[in-house]
Structure formats: C-alpha cells, structure tokens
Image (spheres, coloured by chain):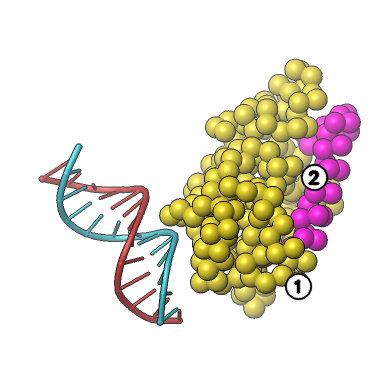
Chain colours: A yellow, B cyan, C red
Amino acid sequence: MDTVKDLLSASLWARSLNPAQFERVVAETQARDFPSGAYVCRKGEAVEHWIGIVDGLVKMTSLSPAGKTTTFTGVTSGGWFGEGSLLKDKTRKYDIEALRPTRVALMPRATFEWLLGTDIGFNRFLLMQLNERLGQFISVVELERLMEPDARVAGSLASLFNPVLYPDQATDIPISQEEIGYLSGVSRQRVNQALQVLEKAGHLKVDYGRIRILDLEGLRNFGR
DNA sequence: TCATTAAATTGTT
DNA sequence: AACAATTTAATGA
C-alpha cells in the first residue's frame, strides 16, 4: 500500500461508506512518514488522531520510571489504533515507535467522531476491533504464563499476522530477531533457537532480517 | 557494473 | 553479554 486511499480501501469499515463520505474521509486524513526508530507518538501527548498504518511496522511500548522498556504489541500494515485513547483518556498511554520506515494515516478527532456519530458500519468495526484486541491480550497473558519460549515466539508472530486487525498484511514481514524478542518477551538468543525449531516444523521461513509465514494456523496452535 | 566499506543482523558460546 | 560470521546498503571508481 502506498497511499491513504489504499489503506482506506483495504479497511473493512470504509467499504460501507457512500462515495461522498469516503471522499470526505480521504480529504481529511493525512499521510505522514517516519524513519526507522522514530516515535510516531509519545506517552502523555494529547491524542488528536486515530492512526492507521499505510505501510510499515510499529510497536507499542511503555517506559517504566526505572528506565525499563516493555513492548506490548506490534501493529502492521492495514491496522488502526488509538481509538481507546481517543474515546477515553484524551492522552496517549503508550509510546509508538516505528520499527522500520513507516507511513501512517492520521485521521483527525473530528472525522473520527463524525463517523462514530453517523455510521453504523464504523461502530460495528470498532466493536469487532476492540474485541479482537482483547482476545489478543488474553492470548499474550496465556502465552506468558503457561507456555514455553518456542510457543511464545510462535504466538507473538501469529498475532502480527492477525487477519482481522491487519487485513493487508502479506505473508512476509521485515523484522529482526531482536525485535521479535521484545515482542514476545524472550531473549534474542532464545528467539533464534525458537525460529529454528519453527522453521524445521515448516511453519515459517527465516530470512535475513525477515520472517515469512508459511502456516499461520500452525503457528497459532503451536504448543497447544 | 563492480569492489570496498560500514552497519546491521545472525548464530553461537 | 560477548564474539565471529554473514548479509545488506551505501559509496565511489
């Protein structure tokens, strides 16, 4: 995907809009590019946009007062985030950092609230997305408390390819093993071992700085 | 287009 | 955490 229009075309909620509504959203939503390593937004900032990933990969992180960083989840192409802060807190609760060059779409609060107030399809989409996220986080807790490292890595990768949250995601993501470690809460060395196991099992292919998914269901169910 | 070099990533201990 | 090996991207001939 290259443009905001591409992202909207791939987004389920935008398909139920009539042409005039669609054009209004396109006109009011702006694209912005971030280099790898840049912060798309910071914790504590006022939330003025709902944000979609046109192309790229970001992670949600939080920095503790003691200076430790933890990664909650990654968001890939086709995904939208920030509706929680937009609806509730009005300030960003997490840092969002680009893991590689990333183009985002910024939908102003006013546009978001207009859709929320007028379009049933949009509301249905938000319900579905919130529900899917809840399932994702429940899965994270389960993986973290019950599963051994191979399964945690498998589960974390599978969540990056969630077809409901990230409809445009290809079978292929450029991501280093170090970042997979942050996402799954496992050391880089252990990620390396896990990836070799998963590759032998035929669930994925390991390339330099890149993971290709061969069997998403296999990954999702690994270790269960 | 090819060779060189620096930087990033990987595999292993 | 440290190390060597490998791959990529950038640079310039």
Q: Position of residue A153 (x, y in %)?
A: 62, 63
Distance from Cα at disc 1 to Cα at disc 2: 24 Å
Q: Which residue is mark 2?
A: A129
Q: Can residue A36 be seen from the camera position used here?
A: no
Tell me: B11 left or right of A43. Answer: left
User: In front here: A87 or A55?
Assistant: A55
What are the residue bounds of the magenta stretch? A112-140
Q: Which residue is mark 1?
A: A145
The secondary structure that most of the magenta stretch takes on is helix
Q: Quadrant of residue A45?
A: bottom right
Looking at the image, which residue is at 57% across and 54% down? A202
Q: Name the element at disc 2.
A: helix
Looking at the image, which residue is at 45% across and 53% down? A207
Q: Is residue A57 magenta?
A: no
Mark 1 and mark 2 in contact? Answer it, CB < 8 Å. no
Q: Amino acid at mark 2?
A: Gln
Q: Is residue A117 magenta?
A: yes
Q: Amino acid at mark 1?
A: Arg
Q: Subunit of mark 1?
A: A
* Quadrant (top left/top right/bottom left/bottom right) for the N terminus of chain A: top right
